[in-house]
Amino acid sequence: MKVLIVGGGGREHALAWAAAKSPRVEKLYCAPGNAGISSVAECVPIGPMEFDRLVAFAKEKKIDLTIVGMDDPLVGGIVDVFEAEGLRVFGPRKNAAILEGSKAFSKDLMQKYGIPTAEYTTVTSPEEAYAFLRTASYPTVLKADGLALGKGVLICENEEQARAGVREIMEDRKFGDSGNRMVIEQFMTGREISVLSFVDGKTIRPMASAMDHKRAKDGDEGLNTGGMGNFSPSPFYTEEVDAFCRKYIYQPTVDAMAAEGRPFTGVIFFGLMLTPDGPKVLEYNARFGDPEAQVVLPRMKNDLIDVVEACVDGRLDEVELEFGDDACLCVVLASDGYPLSYEKGFPITGLETFEGKDDEFVFHAGTAFNEKGEIVTSGGRVLAVTAVADTLQEARAKAYAATERVHFANKYMRHDIGHAIDEV
């Protein structure tokens, strides 16, 4: 079969890598892709928001299945457009992708259906926000309502910081229209866990747990990023936690969306906080996480295409997901200065040292070819150096050793990915 993947980051490279392993896939395309993805798929220069061009390409090439990796096209309604043209596509429709597209919607959904989450209020103007913050407890959390590349969340220690956050989100409009509304949320403490799950509208199949590192600097300091590293499984995601989440969070979320006339097909990313009062939902995403996909997919034994098609066809209840007893950890190599300003266009060396290995991978996030045909940096997050081993400690050691083989001029990374496993 012919498969098209929409997107061009590390998540899409992991998806392309997994799809390419399926014996059912005879031809794989990625739009727009990147330099690394080009080693497993044919990259086509079509942007993820160019729906008409993507539809035309899918028809021209007789694509059998399109997998949408990115949040923007999903929230923008790409699945509705493809389905209207009779094309098979994996991902939530626009009215279901709102689960990620609006923080206010998702919080209201959880409140209505009794899904555990932090207390919150939604404001629609700076004045309303300032009035609320005068009597709020601190720390408190500000969340831009819409998509913000994983960076529209501010943790504020006091009213002064919170007022500055309101100015940033709602007045300076750092995140554009995403700041038209804002959620002010009770600060939660505990371990943060990520769980990706396949959904077919009624059935949910959670994948292996993972643990992200969102802050830019060691010690969980610095600005929020799209993710500086990840590992799977999380030693804090116990059988008891899993049982609670399946009963009170996972299936209730799927049922709630169906009850609202928004049946969800695709991947729901559950961002969880293991609080002293039990697991609670921090956030939902409507697609694979990045870099969660880079550590979860290498551990999955199922054929990705088989699972995706089961979701599209509404027969996920026939599938049992299988994951290895191994562990996986990735370290993001970024451009120094990310997530603010950074230079790009630097040649990358050492990538050939990963060829032929089945326990070490380098997933490309922000790479391109220059006029000389060299692979160069083209984004803030550049690569996700990933290793699989029997234990998390071994995977961490292998991944960090592998980062030393990769070089580019302004390489930056955190040196403490997986630090939490030393506390177990």
Image: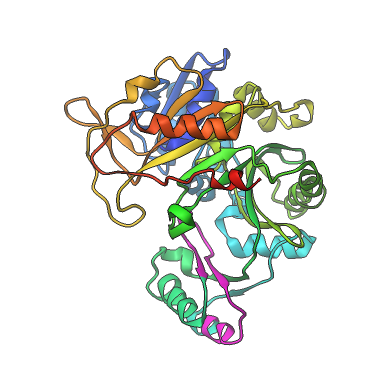
Task: Provide the residue span drawn in magenta.
Answer: 129-155
Q: Give the camera-side residue of 97 and 293.
A: 293
| Residue 118 within the segment the image draws in magenta | no
| Position of residue 285 in the picture relative to residue 229 (left or right) | right
Q: Position of residue 421 (x, y in %)?
A: 60, 43
Residue 230 percent coordinates (x, y): 53, 42
Q: Is residue 386 above or below residue 100?
A: above
In the rendered view, tell whether residue 84 sits above or below residue 4. below
Where is residue 39? Give x, y as percent: 38, 21
The residue at 32%/31% (across/down) is: 406
Is residue 77 shown left or right of residue 413?
Answer: right
Instruction: Say how the picture is coloured.
Output: rainbow
Q: Quadrant of the N terminus?
A: top right
Q: Quadrant of residue 260?
A: bottom right
Compared with residue 153, is residue 128 higher up or lower down, i.e. above or below?
below
Q: Quadrant of residue 296?
A: top right
Q: Is residue 375 above or below residue 345?
A: above
Q: Nearer the viewer, residue 235 or 282?
A: 235
Q: How many numbered callouts?
A: 0
Q: Residue at x 53, y 23 (%)?
A: 19
x and y, in percent, of residue 111 in the image = 74, 65
Residue 5 appears in the figure: no
User: Who's the residue at 35% across and 32% down the image?
Assistant: 404
- The quadrant in which the C terminus is found is top right
Looking at the image, residue 132 sits to the left or right of residue 281; the answer is left
Taking the view exactly as shown, the residue that stands out farthest to the left is 372
Is there any visible trace of residue 50 in the rendered image? yes
Front residue of 219/377: it is 219
